[in-house]
């Protein structure tokens, strides 16, 4: 058990990288890698029956700065895009721009169905999708569902998912009904630099 530690231990660490895939380019006893805190992603806490673990998002680099993971190249490309965008904006007269943030819009659409109804549908049980039933609407015939009020049982489910996602560093920004009946959507934060409230 660790009773206390300094902030410097969070900023940089030296893990045993002998098990990290190297493609045979080095012997395991020569493994050397460093973890560095990535403040662009939120820290989070994993809970278990025996305690809690503070998880600090990190990047993994070699002794000379080579990327040993998939996150560092993404952060470096994001920085390159920012530099190029700033240079472009300066050509248009915007001289006071210091940083350009790139964002992405991931989302997760899903269907919810009562377990009793699910068990009555062999196509859902056997294949996980609808094989029989009415044809899909071609337009917005079901627009009364889209962005309508969310039923209490569904919103309770969404609250539980949002809470569990938040614990592992995935802040959910939006939740709403989708077009099809019983279709819903989550959208996490596009840039995980803050932990914003969930908006309904």
Image (tube, rainbow, N blue to C red):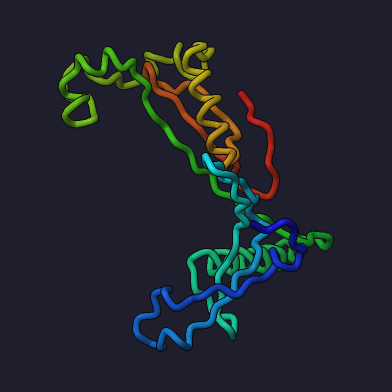
102 sits to left or right of 141? right
Q: Is residue 198 above or below residue 21?
A: above
Q: Is residue 122 visible?
A: yes
**Residue furthest toward the front?**
1
Q: Residue at x 42, y 84 (%)?
A: 28
- The image position of residue 199, as x and y in percent, is 64, 27
Q: Residue at x 63, y 53 (%)?
A: 41
Q: Residue at x 41, y 21 (%)?
A: 179
- The image position of residue 65, as x and y in percent, is 59, 81
- Quadrant in the picture for residue 56: bottom right
Q: Residue at x 68, y 41 (%)?
A: 195
**Residue furthest toward the right?**
96
Quarter of the image with the C terminus in it: top right
- The image position of residue 7, as x and y in percent, is 76, 63
Q: Is residue 169 visible?
A: no
Q: Nearer the viewer, residue 39 or 104?
A: 39
- The image position of residue 169, as x and y in percent, is 59, 45
Quarter of the image with the N terminus in it: bottom right
């Amino acid at each position: 058990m660790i009773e206390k530690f300094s902030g410097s231990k969070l900023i940089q660490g030296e893990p045993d990288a002998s098990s990290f895939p190297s493609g045979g380019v080095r012997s395991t006893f020569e493994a050397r890698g460093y973890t560095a805190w990535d403040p662009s992603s939120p820290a989070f806490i994993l809970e278990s029956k025996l305690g809690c673990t503070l998880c600090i998002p990190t990047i993994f680099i070699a002794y000379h700065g080579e990327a040993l993971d998939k996150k560092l190249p993404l952060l470096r490309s994001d920085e390159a895009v920012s530099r190029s965008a700033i240079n472009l904006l300066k050509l248009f007269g915007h001289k006071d721009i210091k940083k350009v943030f790139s964002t992405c819009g991931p989302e997760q659409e899903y269907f919810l169905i009562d377990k009793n109804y699910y068990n009555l549908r062999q196509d859902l049980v056997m294949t996980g999708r609808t094989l029989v039933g009415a044809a899909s609407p071609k337009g917005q015939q079901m627009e009364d569902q889209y962005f309508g009020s969310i039923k209490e049982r569904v919103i309770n489910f969404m609250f539980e998912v949002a809470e569990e996602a938040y614990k592992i560093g995935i802040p959910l920004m939006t939740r709403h009904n989708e077009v099809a009946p019983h279709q819903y959507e989550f959208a996490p934060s596009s840039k995980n630099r803050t932990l914003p409230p969930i908006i309904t």
